[in-house]
Amino acid sequence: MDMLTIGAFAKACRLSPKALRLYDELDLLRPARVDPDTGYRYYAAAQLEQARLVAWLRRLGMPLAEIRQVGRLYDRDSTAAAREIRAYWARVEAETAVRRDLAAFLVDHLTTDSREPGKDTTMLELRYSAHSDTGRVRPANQDTAYAGTRLLAVADGFGPAGAPASSAAVEALRFLDTDETPAGGVLNLLEDAVRGAAQAVQEVAGGADDGTTLTALLWTGSRLALVHIGDSRAYLLRDGELFLITHDHTVVQSMIDEGRLTAEEAVSHPQRAFLLKALTGGGATVVPDLRLHDAHPGDRYLLCSDGLSSVVPEDRILDLLTSPIGPDETVRALVGAANKAGGPDNVSCVVADVVERAAA
Ligand code: MN
């Protein structure tokens, strides 16, 4: 075996001898041999690749404990090590996305709300419609859909108490439809309302196997605040383009995010219905996704349960949403498309258009 002194090895892998001694102590990279008399460390030339990997992972910002894990995988199977790095990076990006949204909200809140109170008086309002249908296969409808002047919501109940769970969740948000909403505190208000919904679901559902998703939009007069738990979805149609603005809280979506599964494989995955987050009778605390969207005249929002999104392709949804028809006809056309595709699940749709308010 080719042996290098710590100095020569350090030079070859661009780590300092000091870093190498630390990595030895932390069990990240053990020398091939330690002289029992002098205590000198010797490294095998074959360890250079692993040492370079450690150095790169440090530059990536990966915590030492995870580097140790990747190093162990790399010894046996470099593909597994690659997968671990991809999963780590997916987590970093997800955390960054949450922080980015919060930063954008704070910037917006501090520049718009306090300095230009006049902006919230922009004369915009919503035209809306909600429709929910049992579909063609299920014996009952466990979805709940709601649309009012300020509140839009879809909840998809599951388990024996799914129907009361979804209706309790939406009912718990109903006060938001009539109460005056301060634009600055809207996200906190929604967060509290969701806590109330979680409590209400817990009261009507039996256990952790009963529960509901909840995706809702709250109108402030110039913006829409989004709250989201589960795999119901919100889409925004703006300037002819359709944007999915929620992220499914499902096992398969997190596998796609981590690069363990392709979107094509996910369609037929046996665990595609497994939720990572939901409001359940078990009462586990869930942190909802919360976000604020500026409303533009001409925007069209769609909330739907997976009874639509899992059977009607996105380009078909786009077609129906861009048809020159009002929210009432549009929700019926969307539900009709899901039923035409077999209607395997309950299907709920809420469509809301942002329009300029007619002069009084
Ligand atoms: Mn469903």
Image: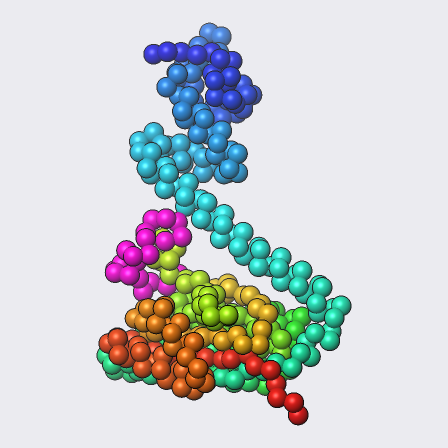
Give how far across and how far down residue 84 sits, in percent: 39, 41
Residue at 49% from the left image edge and 50% from the top image edge: 93
Q: Is residue 260 magenta?
A: yes
Whether 47 is drawn above or below 331: the answer is above
> In this rendering, would 286 be left or right of 107?
left
Give the residues drawn in magenta, as a range: 256-276
Q: Quadrant of residue 268?
A: bottom left
Q: How many marks?
A: 0
> In this rendering, would 358 be left or right of 37?
right
Q: Quadrant of residue 181?
A: bottom right
Residue at 65% from the left image edge and 73% from the top image edge: 183
Considering the image in quadrants, where does the N terminus appear? top left
Give how far across and how far down residue 39 sits, in percent: 48, 12
Chief secondary structure of the magenta portion: loop
Considering the image in quadrants, where does the C terminus appear? bottom right
> In this rendering, would 173 be left or right of 269?
right
Name the residue at the right extreme. 115
